[in-house]
Amino acid sequence: MKQLQTEIKEFIARRNWKQYHSPKNLVMALSVEAAELTEIFQWMTQEESRNVTKETRSHIEEEIGDIMIYLSTVAAAFDIDPISAARKKLVKNAIKYPAPKELSDDGNLT
Amino acid sequence: MKQLQTEIKEFIARRNWKQYHSPKNLVMALSVEAAELTEIFQWMTQEESRNVTKETRSHIEEEIGDIMIYLSTVAAAFDIDPISAARKKLVKNAIKYPAPKELSDDGNLT
Amino acid sequence: MKQLQTEIKEFIARRNWKQYHSPKNLVMALSVEAAELTEIFQWMTQEESRNVTKETRSHIEEEIGDIMIYLSTVAAAFDIDPISAARKKLVKNAIKYPAPKELSDDGNLT
Amino acid sequence: MKQLQTEIKEFIARRNWKQYHSPKNLVMALSVEAAELTEIFQWMTQEESRNVTKETRSHIEEEIGDIMIYLSTVAAAFDIDPISAARKKLVKNAIKYPAPKELSDDGNLT
């Protein structure tokens, strides 16, 4: 993750794009990329979205790449690691949405 | 990254949410989370977006966490690693948008 | 439509919000409202989205109202009427996506 | 407005697209169009967004047209008029965000 953020930083610096990259602009770009991923799925049924062609999968991979680039760049502007942020949020969500108690093999609640 | 995707998978399985998690639904959820990040910045100037309070930074971190969770979950559905996808895309972008030639310290093109 | 745009203009002026309403900010707000509409449908099947409760319909109506307010406000900033813009676009789309020839009742192509 | 909704309905029927137009799909398409409008403004300053070229204005008009088409189509699926919905929401917002009392020319509160 750190390495990706460094590579992106270099990519931007070499093109002198830093001037455009306020967090406000970056989140706009992120939302545009998220919509490009949405566009792939908009007319599919849910079933179709689970069974895509190899070409569509490549397209999905590219859009996920774009989203990840902007997400990492916004995050870096605030010295945030997206993966740590996700793990922190999972812990929080686990409290907010407690998992149902499960029955063990002998029928007792675990 | 792999570890995050495993943790998310477990989180979803324990809550029996897999049934809702078609890629189509997941990209909708991803775009909603991207908008929640956008909402934080919508009335800010670009300058303000570079200088946020500690409270706003926490809020940003949470939304980045949410986006990362859904991005990882969509990606996992297609056996894609978002970080690898981002690095592949960076290479592609470097060809599409070549960096200007730079002068080294001695004035020669690098 | 003109009347709606006038009412919105007054609403904004009385609250002294014009300063925040650059087109850039307004499109961000519009995309956030579009996401709030998306959120209502994200976990529904397509069938469920066709058969919503009365409460959900009210919620949908409110979000459509919000989107329409921001769409009208952005449009007004460029002296555009959204309805005329939609009708112009329909004509353009009709050329881009020609309707298949239809058989009339006597079996001839119309 | 009614006329626009009728024109769109006909446009869709002639192309046999109704099968794809569940409300769920339509809101996805709406959010994608909103992002295409966002894309125009993402790297602009707020000042630039207030002073666009004639070509950019045409582009903006097309995207507003697309958004209006999908907004009208979603709304029609629930028998909602977007303009009435906007006016209802304005009334609600006026209560939620009361306008500050204003001084009249003679210095009294109005």
Image (cartoon, coloured by chain):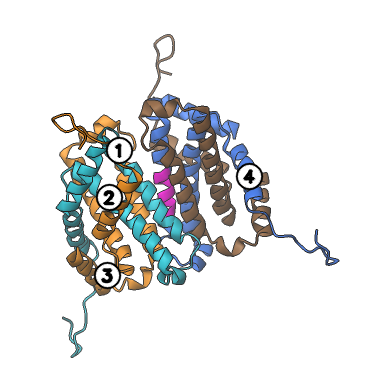
Chain colours: A cyan, B orange, C blue, D brown
Q: How far apart are marks 1 and 2 (CA)?
A: 15 Å
- Above or below, comparing residue D27 to residue C92 in the picture: below
**Are the numbered discs 4 and 2 placed on the same chain, yes or no?**
no
Q: Which mark, by number, is residue B12?
A: 3
- Quick one: label 1 or label 2, which is nearer the N terminus? 1
The chain that hosts pointer 4 is C
What secondary structure do most residues of the magenta stretch adopt? Answer: helix
Residue positioned most to the front = B108
Q: Distance between the residues labelled 2 and 3?
A: 26 Å
Q: Which residue is drawn at 37% across and 50% down?
A: A33
Residues under numbered marks 1 and 3 in contact, where contact means CB atoms less than 8 Å apart: no
Range shown magenta: C31-38
On the image, the x and y values in percent for residue A101 come to: 21, 76
Which is more foreground, mark 1 or mark 4?
4
Q: What element carries label 2?
A: helix
Q: How far apart are marks 1 and 4 (CA)?
A: 33 Å
Which is more foreground, mark 1 or mark 2?
2
Circle 2 is placed at which residue position? A69
> Mark 1 is on which residue type?
Lys
Crowding near pointer 4: few (<14 within 10 Å), some, many (20+)? few
Residue positioned most to the top = D106
Q: Which mark, by number, is residue A24?
A: 1
**Are the numbered discs 1 and 3 placed on the same chain, yes or no?**
no
Q: Is mark 4 on a helix, strand or loop?
A: helix
